[in-house]
Structure formats: structure tokens, C-alpha cells
Amino acid sequence: MSGMNVPATIDQIFILFTNWVASFFPPAYRPLIGVLLGVIGIISVFPGLFALTVLFERKGLGRIQNRYGPNRVGPYGLFQPVADGVKALIKEDIVPFSADAVVHFLAPIVFLTAVFMGYAVLPVGRNMELVNMDAGLLFFFAMSATSELSVFMAGWSSRNKFSLLGAMRAVAQMISYEVPLLLSAVVVVMIAGSLSLPEIVAAQAGYTGVWPHWYVFTPWGFASFIIFGIAATAETNRSPFDLPEGESEIVAGYFTEYSGFKFAIFFIAEYLAMISISGISTTLFLGGWAAPFSFLTIVPSWFWFFAKVMMFLFVFIWVRATLPRLRQDQLMNFAWKFVLPFTLLNLMVTALWRFMGAGWERWVVSTAILVAAYILMGRTGLLSKHIGPRSYRYAE
């Protein structure tokens, strides 16, 4: 085997392994075996990444807040996720007497199933997507929208006013930020000319010298990337948008009446959704599995995908440790009076970029419009009495 073939072999090692296993079966069953192996890979790798993320978050938050993280179970606390999983499995499952037992049971399952369905179209490496749909991006967002239904199912079926209030607040937040989330992805579709996620990655796979052609390095792409990140944080109920789980206000939000493994399913689904949204952000704006520099293409493509996803997860954890929770009025006003108008403006800037043609002029015009709009909306909108900064009153 020559040196030139080694990187390609390592890059496609999972595809080669799948084909090797499928070769032991009759030709008519090989596509089915390939799909089954892909499903097994998804339900093995990403829950494993969830366990590592939880441990990394608890350790990271402890380090940031100058305290110990998990350090009792196993060396350096590395077996803490195992202990948490065993605890969740053996805890009693309590269902309120007046609850709708069927819907109460189905809510976390619907949530987890919808999240796993979204992974089916994510290109985690070169030729490494379970299903290559022409409308893969549309399918991904359709599956992610199902989580809102499961949240409402959980709150309504519990027959608890705290749960219902938490569910309604969560649905209002998720719908409010889902609009800019989708519109910020539309600009990528406008430039790439496709809803296929592998084609979107391929459109960013080129290089100028050593520099990649990622969309985040354009004015409209950078603006959409920031908006997408903000909306994704709100969609996954992460701090500072974790109002649906405002335990100091509504006990524990829409899963107040959940315990045992059903509560653990909600917990797993939320983290898997965070990993999933990190994967789609990587695909849309950071070139997916493409290397950050042309001289690093020798590294397997799947390594770069997961490295970028871990970078996103670190940012989620960092933001959680840094920013306080927003008020409900601040959260909703920020969505409808700043994020959404700015997203609509960015759509027009992207169209202008698309039809101005190559040249430095479109860089100047696009950047000037977006910076001016940011300054104008930030100065006049967010500082007005309708949105306003935080204010505190103290007893005299």
C-alpha cells in the first residue's frame, strides 16, 4: 500500500468496514445491512459523545467556577456518567394519578426519536451520511420541530399547572427562535443552490491557497452564523435561554412530573439535540468535514467534523458558565425586535452578494449594511424602554 493511499483508506475506514460486513450477505440484503450498521453507529457514537459531554461540562463548570467537578467515581471521576446512568435506571418511575399515562409515556420517546432522526442526514465525514436526501436540510428542521410537540405533550399530560406553564413558555420560546434559526439557514441555501447537506459541504470544500471557502468567512455568512448560534442556544434551552427549566420559578418546567428513566430520556434528548444542532452548524457554516487548511486534508474528514462539533459544545458550556438567565420579556423582545429583523435584512444582503458578482465591492457594501444595521438596531432598539437593560431594585 502506497503512502498516497493510506489517508484515503483511513478516511473511508468506516465505509470500507460496512461494505466488508455487507459482503457476507446476499446482494439483495446488502443495502439493508448497510443501513442497519449506520443506525447502530449513530445510536452508539452520539450517546457516547453525550456521556463525554456531560462529564466535560461538569468538569469544565467546576474549573470555571473554582470548585471541584465529579471526582469520586473512578479515576478523576471518569466513571460518573456510568453511575448517573445506573441511578436513572433503578430509580422509581412515578406517574401522577390524574396524568394521561399514555401521552406522559410517549412524550420523552417522541423527543428522543425526533432527535435521532435528524442524525440520519448529517454528513459526519466524506461519503458518511446515513441517508443522502436532496432536501436533507428540510428534513433535519422538520425533525427538530417535532421536539416542540413532545414538550407540549409532556406539560399537558402531567395535569400539573407548573408543568403546563413550563411547556407553554418553552413552546413560545422555541417557536420564536425557530423562525430566525430557519431563515439564517436559508442564506446558505441561496448561495449553495441546494438543500442537500453533502452538496452544501462540497460547495465549501475548496481553498484559496491554504484558506478554506467556508461561508462563515463572508459578511452574510458570519452574521448568519452568529444568529444561528443564538437561536440554536434558545432552541436547545441552554443558558442564558434556559427559562423553560427555570427551577427557581416553575420548579423544573415541563418535566416537573417526570422521574426515573423517563426524566433521563429528556435529559439525554436535550444534550443530543445540542450535539445535533452543533453538527448542522458545522455543516452549514464551517465546511462540515472539510479541513480548516488545505495542508491538513491528509487528516481524516470525520475527525474534522467531530473536532468542530466539540468546539461548539465547548462554547455552549462556556456561555452557560458566563451569562445569567434572561428575563422572559427580554428573551421574547430580543427574538422579535432584534434577531428576526436583522435576519430578514441579512437575507437581502445575501441576495445582493449573490447578484453583485465577484469583486471587492460586494464585500464593502455587504459589510457596511450589516454593521450599520447592527449599530442602529442595537443603539435604538435594545436600549429602549421596551427592551431595556437589566434593572434592579433594593429594599431601603
Image: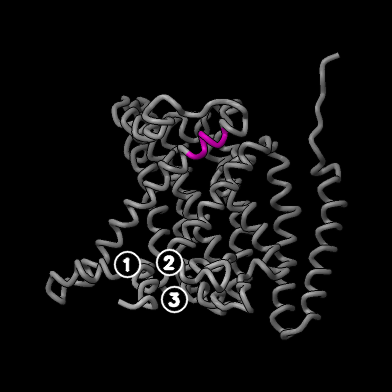
Q: Give amino acid for label 2.
A: Pro
The disc at residue 150 is none
- Between the residue at mark 1 and the residue at mark 2, the CA separation in whole angstroms equals 9 Å
The disc at residue 134 is 3
Q: Give amino acid for label 1.
A: Ile
Task: Evaluate if marks 3 and 1 touch, with contact meaning CB atoms under 8 Å apart.
Answer: no
What residue would you read off at disc 1? Answer: 13
What residue would you read off at disc 2? Answer: 300
| Spot occupied by residue 323 in the image (x, y as percentages of width and height) | 68, 38
Q: Is residue 71 above or below residue 233?
A: above
Tell me which segment is drawn in magenta.
Answer: 56-61
- Which residue appears at 70% of the width and 70% of the height? 218
Q: Secondary structure at mark 1?
A: helix
Indicate the colouring scheme: one colour
Q: Give amino acid for label 3.
A: Asp
- Which residue appears at 56% of the width and 37% of the height? 244
Q: Main secondary structure of the magenta part?
A: helix
Quarter that holds the C terminus: top right
